[in-house]
Amino acid sequence: MAQQSPSQQPLVSVRHVAAALLGWLLPGLGHWLIGQRQRAVILCLAIGGLWLAGALIGGIGVFDRKEHKMWFLGQMLVAPSVVVDVAHESLATRYGPPLPNANPPAAFSPAYGRTQEQGLLYSALAGMLNLLAMVDVLYRQPPGVRLEAAGARTEA
Amino acid sequence: MMVQLPTLSLFSLGGWRPFLDPLPLDSHFLLFLIPLVVVIAVVYKTIKLDDLSTLPKATLVLSVQIIAFMILTALALWMITEMT
């Protein structure tokens, strides 16, 4: 069977789609699976660090798909956000709503004001940057193939 | 009915429980925009650059550009609100 020329090769392969989807589970994993190891480590540290910082600043209370629907659309672009939201709902259901200055202390404390804003911003931006990384995995080809394909399409 | 959760004393610092309690940063919130800008620049340049050896310099340049643009925009908006 004759090998496909670069202009006939699909722009997005099944392998890249699978890698992009796995990148949702852990930032940088998609790039690791397509052989971009250096990029994978940098993206994992940057996006993962941003997400962790958001969780640390605002606490698990900022991951709330009922209270912050629009922000959650960004947050859920990183899989751990969904896990934390489920855990936060479970804690609120099991131990009651968090009350300020409760004795004994509530399972978790909600964030307010600037602290909540920063926590939401950090975690939602981490999600959106992860989406950028996932899209990059979809279309990232070895430079030679990408240039050849682009050149062939331009000529056609 | 409130149930006391066991708190791990190793991880509670002066009563603050990491990830369970928010950080008290109301008075310094603007400073937290700087690491945010740096991370955005890092991720963008990591995706865009073919040669990652230039990543630190490119990240620094982009971060400074973003922060400068944010300051200029804030000044412009402040001037508009002061004039009206």
Image (cartoon, coloured by chain):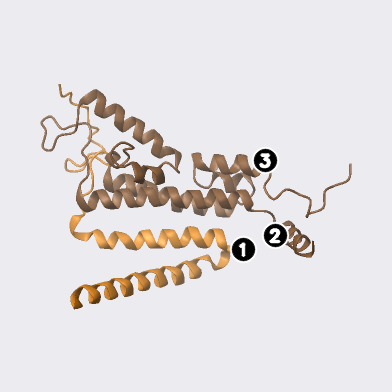
As displayed, is residue B1 above or below residue A138? Answer: above
CB under 8 Å between discs 2 and 3: no
Q: As shown in the figure, which amino acid type bears the numbered disc 1?
A: Asp
User: Residue B22's x, y, as percent?
Assistant: 23, 45
- Pointer 1: what residue? B50
Compare marks 2 and 3 and give the one earlier in the sequence. 3
- Pointer 3: what residue? A14
Question: To which chain does the residue with label 2 belong?
Answer: A
Q: As shown in the figure, which amino acid type bears the numbered disc 3?
A: Val
**Callout 2 crowding tier (Cα within 10 Å): few <14, some 14–19, many ≥20:** few
Residue furthest front as drawn: B84
User: Residue A76's x, y, as percent?
Assistant: 42, 41
Among the chains pictured, the one given brown colouring is A
**Callout 3 crowding tier (Cα within 10 Å): few <14, some 14–19, many ≥20:** few
- Pointer 2: what residue? A143
Q: Do marks 1 and 2 both belong to one polypeptide chain?
A: no
